[in-house]
Image (spheres, rainbow, N blue to C red):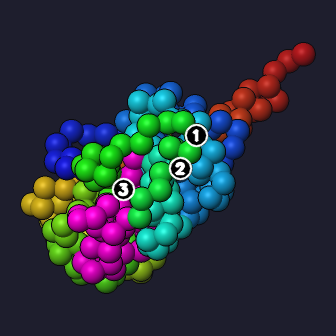
Amino acid sequence: MNSRAEAFRAGAWSTLAGGATAEILARSGAAWVALDAQHGSYDQGGIERTLLGLGSSPVPVFVRVADDSAAGIGRALDCGAAGVIVPLIDGPLEAAAAAQACRYPPAGNRSWGPVTALVGRTAPDARRANDAVMCAVMVETRAAIGQVREIAMTTGVDMVFVGPFDLSLALGRDVDELLADGSADSPLAMVVRVCAEAGVRAGAFAGSSARADRLAALGFTDIAVMTDASLLATAAAAEVARWSNATP
């Protein structure tokens, strides 16, 4: 994927496999949907069922894979993911390996075998698949922040994606204090700056509207502004509270 435009995209994060929550998010108007197989309830079966069920969706569906293994990356893409978000990338060598796992030779080392073709759907040829795929790598460690420029410049990386909760833990800072740091040399400002210089997108997970606002103000181009679990919990609690105070 060669997505260099800087237009802001609000994404939706699905942690709850099954129950059609990803399908609901895909119809919400979000610019993209991510299935979380690292900290969400998506296993391989859940990824496959959801992606095949969303095959006709015009909204790009990404998978945050459980780790940076080439097998896991390839399997998610074989099932129809538009791209992957790869966690815990510490440096450019790991970023390059992730990018190569996303693409068929000669651009990478992905193995041919789309699951979509097994169920009667047309799979793109290798060249088109290589051009269309989105490889996002997560920076969420002290080592990654120290090499974020090199990571962003890595061939085949389309987006640097910040996990602010893990990053705040790694840096020994409160997550909201990290987000509130408006200095030019703050870790988050540096990520946005080097992404702009490298011509790649700057993504982040928010977890709340207030954090999404702050990330947008910092210049991030792709933000997971909502999750299925938080939307359901908030709406359910509000509705129960309303009826608890109702007069029969």
Distance Cα–Cα, label 1 vs label 2: 7 Å
Identify the disc placed on residue 115. 2
Q: Nearer the viewer, residue 86 or 131?
A: 131
Distance Cα–Cα, label 1 vs label 3: 34 Å
Q: Residues within 10 Å of mark 1 (few under 14, many from 20)?
A: few
> What range is drawn magenta here?
82-110
Does 44 sit left or right of 146 as displayed?
Answer: right
Q: Is residue 94 visible?
A: yes
Q: Tell me: residue 201, above or below residue 167.
A: above
* Circle count: 3
Q: Is residue 174 visible?
A: no
At label 2, the amino acid type is Val
Q: Position of residue 247 (x, y in %)?
A: 85, 18
Residue at point 57%, 60% (across, down):
37
Check disc 3 and report its element: helix, strand or loop.
Answer: strand
Contact, CB < 8 Å: mark 1 with mark 2? yes
Identify the disc placed on residue 152. none
Q: Nearer the viewer, residue 65 or 45?
A: 45
Q: Tell me: residue 63, above or below residue 241.
A: below
Residue at point 36%, 56% (across, down):
204
Residue at point 24%, 78% (across, down):
92
The residue under label 3 is 204
